[in-house]
Amino acid sequence: MKRPLLLVTLLAGIVFGCKEDTNIAAVTNDGLSLYWDHEIFGEEGRRFRFEFSSQKALSEQYQLVFQKAITANIITVRLASTTSQGPCQSFPGAKPGCLSKGGFSIPEKDLPPGTYTINLITPSFTESGRLTITSEKAVLDLGANNQFTSSVEQVFPIPRQLLFGSIVYTGSDKTQAANDLIAYLSTLGVTPATVPDHPYRHLSSEASHLATKNWPEDNHMISLLYSMKRSFRDIIGDLKRYVDQTGQPLSIYLYSSLGGEVRLGTTDPLFIYGADQ
């Protein structure tokens, strides 16, 4: 009885392996497109995110599973397997079809400034590109090929040690409370900051320090942008005590470029100090 069971097991493994290879080939036959950016929020901390999608729509959607490795200045990305997500949603009059996607992240600390070769390996093709990291930005050069493409050429990681956000309130009579809060913030080890006019993912170029925005009916917002000389956690601790003691009638939204996020005042409280705090 053991030998037939073993034979069935081996045959099942062979069939599964062939099916998996067929899926990968179908997904990658026309190549893969890459979207990438720089993220600061979440448990993984500051990192570069890479999200691949198939260039060809299929009637079934697959989750793409990648393996990555960094050796010296070579980043090897291998499409290891696919997992079926089921048939694509159909729409009246249209043939069902959707793109398959999958990706991974690389911690910022694992990509110090330098030039890296990035190799994308699939059962259908192997292509390479060049990723250049500087203190200001990251640039991806894929050359001229049709199988490994990206519409994103450069990414600007938000500078470290920034505190940014806004104060929001309704009623001009609360403007003095907002000004008092800003005056107190200036005593907590922060200084007004400016940043280059780059398309940062989480920081608008229009959100300069103390820029104001007003809209009906009598709603107001003041933008904040500081450089931190203390930890985000310690700054927020002092600020929370101030808000609790004074009962400020304001909604306060603050973020750290190290991944922290806080809501205080008249909003529902939220305290996330970030992976790098």
Image (spheres, rainbow, N blue to C red):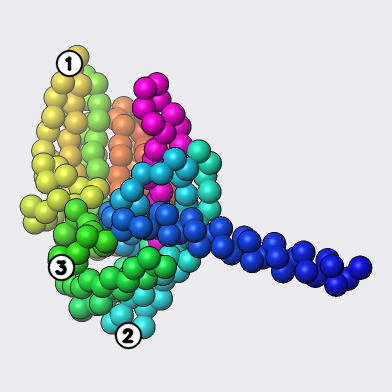
Is 207 above or below relative to 266?
A: below
Q: Is residue 245 magenta?
A: no
- Where does label 2 land, which residue? 72
Above or below 42: residue 123 = below
Q: Which quadrant holds residue 120?
A: bottom left
Residue named by callout 3: 143
Q: In what element is the residue under mark 1?
A: loop
Q: Position of residue 218 (x, y in %)?
A: 18, 17
Does residue 5 appear left or right of residue 199 in this picture?
Answer: right
Q: Amino acid at mark 1?
A: Pro
Q: Residue at x 75, y 65 (%)?
A: 9
Q: Is residue 125 left or right of residue 213?
A: right
Identify the residue at image location x=41%, y=48%.
100
Residue under label 1, please give it. 216
Question: Was residue 93 drawn as part of the magenta stretch in this picture?
Answer: yes
**Residue lying at the far left of the rendered structure:** 197
Q: Position of residue 71 (x, y in %)?
A: 36, 83
Q: Which residues are magenta?
A: 88-104
Q: Amino acid at mark 3?
A: Gly
Comes first in the chain, label 2 or label 3: 2
Q: Main secondary structure of the magenta part?
A: loop
Dot label at residue 28: none
Q: Which residue type carries mark 2?
A: Ala
| Of marks 2 and 3, the one in the foreground | 3
